[in-house]
Amino acid sequence: MTDFSATVRTATAALRDLFPETPLQRNDYLSDRYGADIWLKREDLTPVRSFKLRGAFNAMRKIRERDPSQTHFVCASAGNHAQGMAFSCRHYGVRGTIFMPITTPQQKIAKTRAFGGDLVEVVLVGDYFDRTLASAQAWCQEQGAYFLAPFDDDDVIEGQASIGAEIMDQLGKAPDMVVLSVGGGGLASGVSRFLREVSPETDFRFVEPTGGASLKAALGAGAPHRLETVDSFVDGAAVARLGDRTFAALSWVNPENVILCPEDRICVTMVEMLNVEGVVLEPAGAMAIDALDDVADQIAGKTVVCVVSGGNFDFERLPEVKERAQRFMGRKKYFILRMPQRPGALRDFLMILGPDDDIARFEYMKKSARNFGSILIGIETTDPANFERLFAEMEVQGFGYRDITHDATLAEYLI
């Protein structure tokens, strides 16, 4: 056993003071779909509903062992890392100051305070995370506290690697493939390093959201590279720059084994897992399952473990998730309709709709000085093929239209 795998085993044993190992469950639904033996490592079932507790606890444990006088910890986080640190602070009876963006949902703020109790103070600073992070680091230096990084820390990486140790013990053999989500890289670097040492035959796939592909960018540049823009929808993995330490641990990865998942397709997976399996996943937590579509031709008959990284989902976001899923599946479209301003024109349009077509959005601006008016209309249907018939009939009837479903600029302002 190497030094790393040995320390990971020690970290895994220490975690049992905090919570039992998370389940490794065979999923019959996914196994049947892909003709493989699909297992889900349920990190959404930790006390804070994500894997982040592992790294935060392990780092705090080792810091306390090295310096028992360290009793004040600071972090910057908009979600799971904050909750993991708060839980660890309560366990050790130490102070925690957690900086969060002002825009953080109240649900996440409340959970962080609940996990930390009187030992943890939440400080709301900045509209965006970069400002929050800078404030936290500056304040931490002034106070002489210890800054607990969310991913770019050797002890945090070691703590996340405990997932790999549990997989090996629970499965009883080496998996053929492990699918890992990537944000800052702590989970991916820790688990892959451990498993490469103890089961070198295991293959890996790394999954990022299309709008936050920091690992893909780093591998292409040969070093961590800051993305110019990041889509924040997959908030648990929308990281602009991979960590230095995590990149060092992942620099061996073949870029072809990094899968980019469209945000709207992740929504399809979230809705499907909720409706079919009753499993509540956050966007980042659904990525490993979502990526199975991309490796379907590579996993037949194989044992595959998907690490479900978290389930901190705010149900106020469910309408948006369902909306994006429907658009991705082609069952909902938005378009601007050019409507003749004559009596009966609207009725003529409505007669074109089929029995499975439902109007979900309708905004009409009549301008009396013009012969035509514009309508923003959204239509849901049960089969994407219904739109082909609808659009063909609209053209025959002389109704001009512009499909804006995937026009990001117009959709942002109109939908």
Image: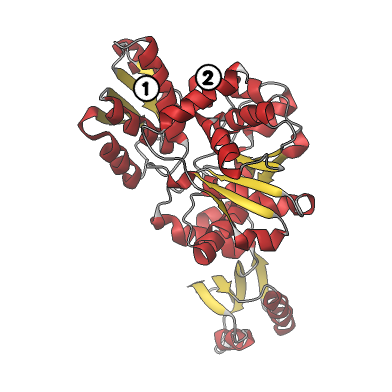
Label 1 belongs to which residue?
136
Tell me if label 1 and label 2 are in contact, CB under 8 Å. no
Task: Name the residue located 56 percent from the left edge and 62 percent from the top edge.
Answer: 272
- The amino acid on which the numbered mark 2 sits, given as a three-letter code, is Asp
For marks 1 and 2, the one nearer the N-term is: 1
Q: Is residue 386 left or right of residue 415?
A: right
- Residue 207 drawn above or below residue 289: above
**Number of marks in the rendered image:** 2
- Residue 113 drawn above or below residue 155: below
Could you classify mark 2 by the number of other residues whose Cα lies within 10 Å: few (under 14), some (14-19), or many (20 or more)?
Answer: some
Find numbered disc 2 in the image and state the secondary structure of the residue it sits on.
Answer: helix
Looking at the picture, how far across and down is residue 299, in whole percent? Answer: 75, 50
Q: Which mark is residue 154?
A: 2
Q: Is residue 183 visible?
A: no
Task: Name the residue located 37 percent from the left edge and 22 percent from the top edge.
Answer: 136
- Residue 219 drawn above or below residue 345: above
Q: Observer-nearest residue: 111 or 201?
A: 201
- The amino acid on which the numbered mark 1 sits, given as a three-letter code, is Ala
Q: Which mark is residue 39?
A: none
Q: Is residue 169 visible?
A: yes
Position of the N terminus, as image quadrant, is: top right
Looking at the picture, how far across and down is residue 239, in whole percent? Answer: 55, 33
Q: Observer-nearest residue: 113 or 354?
A: 113
As drawn, which residue projects farthest toward the front?
Answer: 172
